[in-house]
Image (spheres, rainbow, N blue to C red):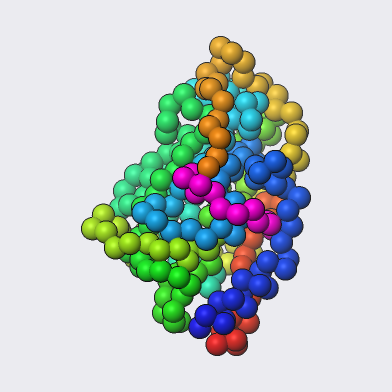
Amino acid sequence: MLFGFMVAVALSARCLNAQQIVNGQIFTPGIAIVDSPQPNTPLGGDHLQVAIDVSSDGQLQLPPYPSNPVSAIYNITIFLSSDITGWNFTISNGTASNGSLGEIMAQENGSTVKHVNWVWPDCLVGKGPPGDNDSARGLYNISIRQNFRLNGSDEYTIFDLPIHVTNSIPAQDNRSSCASLNNTLLNESALVASANNFTRIPGTPIQGHGNSGSGLGGPKPDANPGNGLGGAGMLDWRTGLHVMWIGAAVFMLAL
């Protein structure tokens, strides 16, 4: 089983591309920038921690926005999904319930960086890579979906950040059941059809940006290992496309 896991990791890494990582920041196809974790980081601990800059390095003001904004993030939803295990967990869909978090944009009022702290569900408890075919641990994508307006155009994008759920996750009473957080895992065609064929090139100016009186918070804190950062990795993404983990079939054949 361990050999199969390593084969899947190796195959996925070969197709990765780091062109959208700029000075350690991961530029999504939309407005938000991911500060941590880095791609392909082994994660564990009590929580999954994700830091998202929703101002795009200070270019966009924080809510509340004008009634007809030129640029704005309407909402961000986040899921943790894996084509290998078949699980698709809700991290945040705008409503806090059953272990999922509330609206990302409403968290940490006044801060341009939103820190997601999501309690891992019970089926991910353990240590190391998956030990057998029934394990829920292993390769996952943090799937970040943005509904936003950029320079007068409404867009919806899906961006996947690959991670490895292989570090130790201790058993705790506050862990939700995996079944209560799970959603149907859509296939690639359905996800492609749901998102816009849009990519914001890093550095593209945002019209209607904020200023000192627009609700921008202070500068984002420096990232450190406590924020969930791991070693630098490489990232594969496609415009408006849910990046699917390749190698599921090879993973099975290698067992």
Q: Name above or below for residue 255 compared with residue 220.
A: below
- Residue 230 % position (x, y): 56, 53
**Viewport quadrant of the C terminus:** bottom right
Q: Name above or below for residue 73 compared with residue 96.
A: above
Which residue: 46% across, 48% down?
49
Which residue: 76% across, 40% down?
201
- Residue 68 % position (x, y): 59, 22
Q: Is residue 90 left or right of residue 75?
A: left
Let me know if residue 183 appears in the view. no
Which residue: 39% across, 52% down?
47
For the magenta stretch, what is the residue range? 225-236
- Residue 158 % position (x, y): 60, 51
Let me know if residue 3 appears in the view. yes
Q: Residue furthest top?
A: 213
Q: Is residue 40 left or right of residue 120?
A: right
The total number of labels drawn is 0
Q: Quadrant of residue 248?
A: bottom right
Magenta part, dominant SS: loop
Q: Name above or below for residue 53 compared with residue 135.
A: above
Does residue 53 show up magenta in the picture?
no
Q: Is residue 5 left or right of residue 208?
A: left
- Residue 9 % position (x, y): 61, 71
Which residue: 55% across, 77% down?
5
